[in-house]
């Protein structure tokens, strides 16, 4: 009888609390014994890390070459100290490597820079791939510095604007922005893996 009771107790699932922390590189850390206040209670599987299909090295899923601007991306990455794979992920999410892309809101070029930012970023021709990538990388670096290296907040600010990130004190609850951050992070991890 005692053996039967022990078997039944052993079969009952035990759920402990799990905590999660996302570092500045976008890496998720899980623990049942948090070592700092950065860890928050894990409530559900986050949408941000659901995998996307593997990134093709030659095609972006449209008619635009995914490698055509690699030289410019490398130059911008070195100049501003941003990972090549991260910049490429941002460009893929923003424009699908289309240098002539224009959004419904007027964002322009490979890195989809808003017209309000042309003058502050000294952009003469937003459709010029080099000019657009250099300016977009400079702007993203400003967001990364503003949010102290917190990658997902910086991406959210690049997409929705820093005022929205500040107002929400985190990633704004806009489906477009949440999807954007998830997309860029998945593309980034795919490019990093090679």
Image: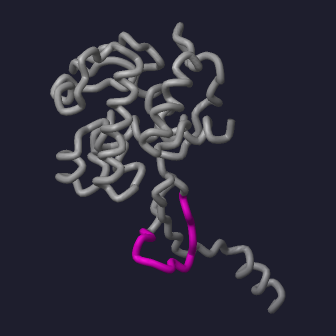
- The N terminus lies in quadrant: bottom right
Give the prevailing secondary structure in the magenta stretch.
loop
Image point 40% across, 14% down: which residue? 99
Indicate whether 164 appears above or below 112.
Answer: below
Please state the horizontal and vertical placement of residue 79, each as a whole percent of the image.
Answer: 44, 39
The total of numbered circles placed on residues is 0
* Residue situated in front as seen by the camera: 180 or 45: 180
Q: Is residue 147 left or right of residue 13?
A: left
Please state the horizontal and vertical placement of residue 52, each as a whole percent of the image.
Answer: 58, 33
User: Residue 31: which quarter of the image?
Assistant: bottom right
Image point 50% across, 29% down: which residue? 73
Query: Among all residues in the image, which is located at the extreme bottom?
Result: 2
Image point 48% across, 60% down: which residue? 23
Indicate whether 120 appears above or below 11.
Answer: above
* Residue situated in front as seen by the camera: 29 or 79: 79
Please state the horizontal and vertical placement of residue 151, each as a whole percent of the image.
Answer: 42, 50
Q: Is residue 114 something that shows in the picture?
A: yes
- The C terminus lies in quadrant: top right
Image point 23% across, 40% down: which residue? 161
> Does the magenta run of residues contain 33?
yes
Q: Is residue 31 left or right of residue 36?
A: right
Q: Is residue 186 something that shows in the picture?
A: no
Query: Among all residues in the image, which is located at the extreme top?
Result: 63
Q: Is residue 22 left or right of residue 2?
A: left
Q: How is the image coloured?
A: one colour
> Does the magenta run of residues contain 176?
no
Indicate whether 118 appears above or below 145.
Answer: above
Q: Which residues are magenta?
A: 28-40
Indicate whether 86 appears above or below 100.
Answer: below
Please state the horizontal and vertical placement of residue 133, each as a whole percent of the image.
Answer: 40, 26
């Amino acid at each position: 009888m005692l053996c039967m009771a022990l078997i039944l107790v052993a079969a009952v699932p035990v759920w402990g609390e799990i905590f999660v922390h996302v570092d500045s590189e976008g890496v998720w850390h899980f623990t049942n014994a948090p070592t700092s206040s950065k860890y928050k209670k894990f409530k559900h599987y986050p949408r941000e890390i659901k995998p996307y299909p593997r990134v093709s090295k030659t095609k972006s899923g449209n008619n635009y070459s995914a490698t055509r601007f690699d030289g410019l991306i490398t130059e911008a990455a070195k100049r501003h100290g941003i990972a090549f794979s991260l910049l490429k992920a941002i460009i893929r999410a923003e424009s699908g490597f289309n240098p002539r892309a224009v959004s419904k809101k007027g964002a322009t070029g490979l890195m989809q820079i808003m017209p309000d930012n042309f003058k502050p970023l000294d952009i003469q021709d937003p459709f010029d791939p080099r000019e657009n990538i250099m300016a977009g990388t400079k702007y993203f670096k400003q967001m990364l510095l503003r949010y102290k290296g917190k990658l997902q907040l910086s991406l959210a600010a690049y997409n929705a604007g820093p005022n929205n990130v500040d107002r929400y004190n985190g990633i704004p609850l806009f489906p477009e922005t949440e999807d954007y951050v998830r997309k860029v992070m998945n593309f980034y991890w795919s490019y990093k893996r090679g």
